[in-house]
Amino acid sequence: MKLIKRILPMFLAVMLFTAMIPAASAATTISIKIDGQTVSSDTAPYVENGTTLVPVRVITEYLGADVSWVQAKQQAVVKTAGYTVVFTLGSKNYTVNGVTKTLLLAPRAVNQRTMIPLRALSEAIGADVDYDAATKTAVVNYFTTMTGSIKISGSTTLQPIAQAAADKLLSMNTGLSIAVSGGGSSAGIKDTINGANNVGMSSRVLTADESASLTQFTVANDGIALIVNPNNTVKNLTKEQAEKIFLGEITNWKDVGGNDAPILVQTRETGSGTLATLSELLLEKAAVVSTATPYASSALIKQAVASDVNAIGFDSIGYVDSSVKVVSIGNITPTTETVKSGAYLLSRSLYVFTKGTPEGVNAKFIDFLKSESCQKDIVVKEGYIAIR
Amino acid sequence: MGKTGNLKDLNAPEKLIHILSLVSVLAIIFIFVFVGIKAWPVIRASGAGLVATAGFDKQVSEAFFAPAEAPVYTFGLLGLIAGTLFTTGLSLLAAAVLGIGAAIAIAELAPKPVASALGAVVRLLASIPSVVFGLVGIIVVVPAVEQAFVTTELQIEYLKYFQITGRSLLASVLVLTFMIVPMVISLSIDALRAVPGSLRETGYAFGMSRFRVIWKIVLPSARSGILAGMILAFGRGIGEAIAVSMVCGGIGNIPDLSMGFVSLLTPVLTLSAAIINKSEAMGAYAVESALFACGALLLLIGAALSIGARLIENRLKRSMGDAD
């Protein structure tokens, strides 16, 4: 018995090992490098008969494309700013902006992921693709091959995102120039229609007239929570109360149902997108009362509110935690849902747009704004809600 | 050929030193020119108003949101200049009293082993990075100021002018004092120790007491060194950005002395802290230029300080009669 007890686990281990070997050698699994970064994927890409197959979603999310799956037609639809590419499972034909082209291998499903030939996908949307046999790496360059110039103007709320994205892209490319300026949403829309910029930015929805000649993309969502100290008894403010507090017209908590104590308004330094949004949505573009203490970051304003019982501030809902208390506005609490549905007062989407369908570097700039890395490293860091 | 300074006559290490010093001179010139060029649009548009008017916070906001075709280049830095002079001046005053006193205690009165231990501690304190002082300021000093002086009634009474929280001129002065006191102490110790022993002995020979010797002989002889230390400390105080920006309150108010003690609780903003705090708005070219104007002012003050230090030193030396 003892012998069996000792041998059985070893036996099982050997079985397990031998079982794994054929699975691993069936096809060569490889890694992917996009713009110099190794990309991880739950379903590994592999090479079959000299063709590299990659999970469509992994690549396209890095490149800022939207992928949708049409179950009835077994089709994967990949949309970048400039291209719409349709792949059909089991079919070598695919279309780019409606034009039919042919693949070397038909797309197939592996672990419920649509695998498509890397070269076709990347060439369809204008990426540089190479396969490095020595390191078994598929190399894709998309945001590192941009040349030319882009002029961007419009919403000052989006300005920090666009500026940060521009800075990032400029550091990744030589021969690229990007000029970002403000002016406000309406001016940006006007500029785009008149051809005075390449990409316009707006923090409001375009009117029917405006959108007739423009192609627009949502690049971020934004929701701002009004925050107070956890020991503050006030739970809800009407829109009017909130507005008057931040304009300095209501200065005592007792006027909104709290204790007899001063309302100490905490604000953000000029340049903050969160401040700009608050001013636009709550204060009709007026400035926050001039005695408000300004902070340089979302973290600092939160810390200030957390440490002063009479303070009120505002922060992107992404920053809010248990150290502060969220005050509802008109009894609606900001959540990802109420922000996305627009039920919450201080919520909206942020848009960029071009005249007609974007092309070349302009399209890539928009793709970058929508890409996973920009959403994570720039949009969220600047205090907005990511679209992914 | 020339006596000195001709590169041909020098050997390799001397040449290297000459070249290196030339490089540092060029770097300094480059900094002045670069900052000047960057600040020029705002200096030109604002003129004398740059140092004579206030309202920086509002102007930054206006300049940032201005449409591209009508940029705002007029700024007034008076609030920041006032904040800088008040914080640095008051903390220098406090540091002088504390620092020179401590230096006398360490250099003249304490027994040798105690003195050397204290000296080491002081030097250690002088090397603490400023962000640490800022952290201590925000965690200890700001709440302490709030606990000691801020009442709800006071807050309500002054809310129309400014918020009274711990973040204030007083907190900045306290933090800055902690920062520059070690510098004043260690430089004063050096100055006191440099006074020749023979001078002290002469004093004692005349039957002077220990304190009289310190007061009448040692301190006057050491004053140029002490003064140099004070000027260095002033320079550090004026340039200090991080620690001050964390505790000053971040608004360029000019402290109103008619408010009495409450004026010490005014939130202020210094030139160097403004460069940090307002850098978020630097996406607008006008704001960038305005911040460089702050930098240009700081450079000018720094240059004036070092020239002033040299002049004072020379005058003191001449009046002391030792022209070495």
Image: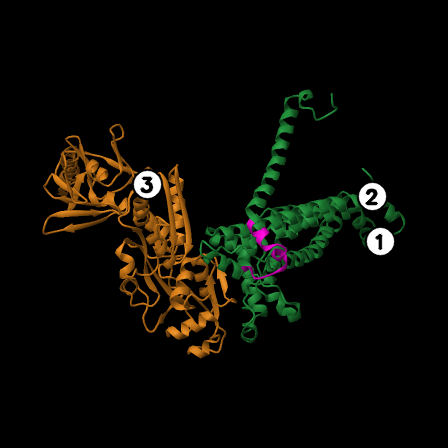
Chain colours: A orange, B green
Rendered-image quadrant of the C terminus of chain B: top right
Q: Which residues are magenta?
A: B41-56
Query: In front: A84, or B160?
Result: A84
Q: CA distance from mark 2 to mark 3?
A: 67 Å
B292 vs A188, left or right, is: right
Picture residue at 55% right of the left edge, 50% below the top: B41
Question: Residue at label 3?
Answer: A143
Badge 2 or badge 1: first in the primary sequence: 1
Which mark is in front, 3 or 1?
A: 3
Question: Residue at label 1?
Answer: B209
B151 vs A374, left or right, is: right
Q: CA distance from mark 2 to mark 1?
A: 28 Å
B105 versus A250 height, above or below: above
Question: Residue at label 2?
Answer: B318
Q: Specify the amino acid type for callout 3.
A: Phe
* Magenta stretch holds residue B55: yes
Res A1 seen here: no
Task: Where is residue A256? Give x, y as percent.
Answer: 42, 77
Task: Where is residue B223? Give x, y as percent.
Answer: 77, 48
Q: Specify the amino acid type for callout 1.
A: Ser
